[in-house]
Image (spheres, helix red, strand yellow):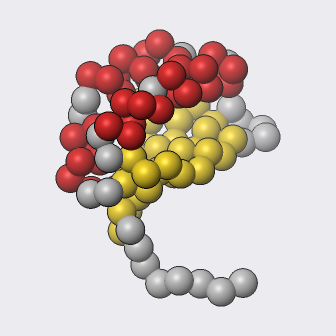
Amino acid sequence: MSCLLIRHKVQDYSTWKAVFDEQADVRRANGSQGGRLFRSTESGEVLVLLEWDDLERARLFVDSDDLKEGLIRSGVAGAPDIWFLEDGDHLLA
């Protein structure tokens, strides 16, 4: 499985989340298979872990105007940290 992990600080979570939700169809059209959203309880940081059908399509999405515009409109503070990930070993609890 290919994944895209994005970490960024947001000024207002509700504003950010509304824009993130608006862009669900754009993400899906670009290969996102859904994922998980994590939010820091202390620092205003958000982590988005998305499964992707293909890492190259994930890279194209990261470079897209759709994502850049969404980051601006949603109030992301500073540049996001972005990682392109492939499955490693499966861990058992």
In-image side of 60 versus 79 (left or right): left
Q: Is residue 18 above or below residue 1?
A: above
In this rendered view, identify the residue nearer to me: 28 or 87: 28
Look at the image and tell me whether residue 11 can be seen: no
Residue at the spot 71% in from the left edge and 36% down from the top edge: 43
Q: Is residue 29 left or right of residue 50?
A: left
Quarter of image, res 81? top left
Q: In this view, does 60 lie above or below 15?
A: below
Q: Is residue 1 visible?
A: yes
- Left or right placement of residue 45 versus residue 51 in this view: right
> Image quadrant for the N terminus?
bottom left
Residue sitting at x 45%, y 26%: 23
Identify the residue shown where x is 69% and y is 41%.
39
Report the quarter where the C terminus lies: bottom right
Residue 77 picture location, percent across and down: 52, 22
Residue farthest to the right, as pictured: 41
Query: Is 9 left, or right, of 5 in this rendering?
Result: right
- Label tally: 0
Q: List x then y, in percent, for residue 59.
A: 25, 46
| Image coordinates for residue 86, horizontal then vertical, percent | 36, 68
Residue shown at the point (55%, 27%) measured from the top left = 21
